[in-house]
Amino acid sequence: MQYPTGYRHLNSLLQEPETRATFLAQGYDPAGGSPEDFHRVLGGEVATWSRVIRAVDIRFE
């Protein structure tokens, strides 16, 4: 699999104290990670919210 360019640079920026402080002040956790990490987290979110939508019978019009 070919990864998007720049994710390593983005990860290093997210570890800089000033950048981390900015994100944390806005309520975000600047974790960074690999493309595999992102895929895993996104897949988990989709699965979680799919269950919620089915459980409360949300229907889109």
Image: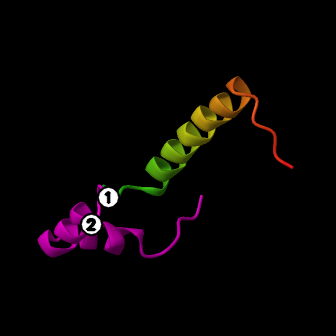
Q: Residue at x 17, y 67 (%)?
A: 21
In the figure, 46 relative to 11: above or below? above
Q: Amino acid at mark 2?
A: Phe
Q: Is residue 23 left or right of residue 50?
A: left
Extreme right residue here?
61
Q: Residue at x 76, y 29 (%)?
A: 57
- Residue 21: within the magenta? yes
* Residue at the spot of label 2: 23
Can the viewer see residue 50 in this picture? Answer: yes
Q: Amino acid at mark 1?
A: Tyr
- Residue 5: within the magenta? yes
- The reply to whether dot 2 and dot 1 touch (C-beta < 8 Å) is yes
Q: Is residue 16 left or right of residue 27?
A: left
Q: Residue at x 52, y 70 (%)?
A: 4
Q: Earlier in the sequence, mark 2 or mark 1?
A: 2
Can the viewer see residue 15 in this picture? Answer: no
Extreme left residue here?
17
Horizontal and vertical percent for residue 12? Answer: 25, 70
Find the magenta span and give its range: 1-29
Q: Residues within 10 Å of mark 1 (few under 14, many from 20)?
A: few
What is the spatial separation of the Cα atoms under label 2 and label 1, in whole angstroms? Answer: 5 Å
The image quadrant that residue 16 belongs to is: bottom left
